[in-house]
Image: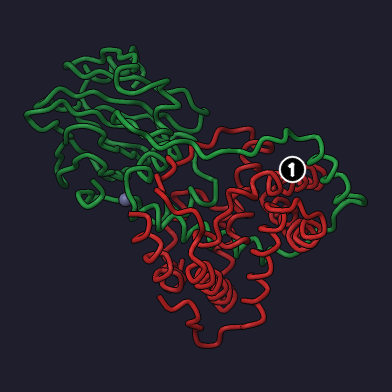
Amino acid sequence: MNGTRIGAGMNEEAVSKRAEWVAEIAAIRDHADQAAFAAVFRHFAPRVKAFLMKSGASPDMAEECTQDVMATLWRKAGLFDPAKASVSTWIFTIARNRQIDMIRKQRRPEPEELDWGPEPEPDQDDAIALQQETEQLGAALQALPEKQRILIERAYFGDLSHSEIAEETGLPLGTIKSRIRLALERLRHQMR
Amino acid sequence: MTTQIKHHLTDALLMGYAAGTLPEGFSLVVATHVSLCDDCRARLAEYEALGGEVMMDAGEAELTDGSLEATLALIAGMPAAAPVRKAARTAGIFPAPLRDYVGGDKDAVRWRRVGGGVRQMVLKTDGASTVRLLHIPAGVAVPDHGHSGTELTLVLQGAFRDETARFGVGDIEVANDDLEHTPVAEPGEDCICLAATDAPLRFNGLLPRIAQRFVGI
Ligand SMILES: [Zn+2]
């Protein structure tokens, strides 16, 4: 498996930044490294808070929830697997779940965990490839025409209901999905 | 099992679930299907990655003074034990998220009769959606009904057919308000489904309508 494949126009600096975040989460997990945590916090906490406010939370509520998200990140660092999600994806799922619990006070049914079998260490090549693919996805999102990008953002901020997403034919989901399809198909084969 | 699934979640449902904006009853059906379907599990991972990138582009809000210190204090006050992954299901037909709502597997369901041999159990969720288990005897039809919203039906045992297709274990039917259909359980095995609606069903015909008032389906 070729983990060094770099897509056209890939921003190598952004990819190495993502690899740094992976290393920082590992330092939190293995050494309770407060400096690594502070670096992750400085980068992600303002973005988590902005996301929560755009999703309708008051500034106070968003601050409280953001601190909870970052504390959850510390506690769950051992569950992070860089071959299955990038750090930005993982933090998004934590923020989404804490938002549903703390702000909307709803219950979130989660899929059953897969039985991963004996796979002690995540595959290094897969981890690198997934960080690259996620960077490509982010670049693809930014490159969309503004109208389409805003529609996608509104869906994630909770401004579009399920039926509105279904009716919205302008969502360019196919093009975006194809960017990470390959990496995820590789993952899926491993999961079997 | 996965290779037999023919009817999958729509992009809109996966995106809504990844965003965390679906009504709870829909989320339960999505989580249950994803538990059974590697295809949709991988598609969900794509939509979660997209959500992560939307979050990264959402700008930066100013944190309150001492936000990092307050978070470190939160961490210091947390229990030391590391969270562990839940064990995968070893037996039964209900995936873990559904078992959590029922309080067990098929044997734990508290069925109530709704007429025509059909039984149901309504699961407790927020008010924005209704989700229930349906037990339809082999060969029996669910009363003819249309929808004023979206109805999701996920097969957990047996199979049913309606005017559109055949749905076996793991298959999900996503029916919109333009579909009037009569699902019929296949002969041979009783059919158990998980069904969610975001609006009350309206049954066609006087008797089912009266029954609806009494049994709440
Ligand atoms: Zn599926």
Q: Nearer the viewer, residue A159 or A62?
A: A62
Residue topped by disc 1: A68
- Taking the view exactly as shown, the residue that stands out farthest to the right is B65
Q: Please tell me the colour of chain A.
A: red
Q: Is residue A64 left or right of residue A140?
A: right
Q: Is residue B195 above or below residue B57?
A: above
Which color scheme did the rendering employ for the protein?
by chain
Mark 1: few, some, or many residues within 10 Å (few <14, many ≥20)?
many
Q: Tell me which residue sits at (69%, 44%) in the image.
A: A75
Q: Tell me which residue sits at (47%, 82%) in the image.
A: A5
Residue A147 visible at all: no
Q: Tell me which residue sits at (40%, 57%) in the image.
A: B42
From the image, which quarter does the C terminus of chain B lie in? top left
Q: Position of residue B156 (x, y in %)?
A: 26, 34
Amino acid type at mark 1: Asp
Q: Position of residue B135 (x, y in %)?
A: 23, 23
Q: Is residue B110 above or below residue B70?
A: above
Q: Tell me which residue sits at (53%, 61%) in the image.
A: B49
Q: Position of residue B182 (x, y in %)?
A: 17, 34
Residue A183 visible at all: yes
Q: Nearer the viewer, residue A29 or A76?
A: A29
From the image, which quarter does the N terminus of chain B lie in? top left
Q: Please tell me the colour of chain B.
A: green
For label 1, the SS is helix
Asked where in the image residue B191 lies, by quadrant, the reply is top left
Asked where in the image residue A131 lies, by quadrant, the reply is bottom right
Callout count: 1
Q: Is residue B147 left or right of residue A138?
A: left
The chain identifier of the residue carrying mark 1 reads A
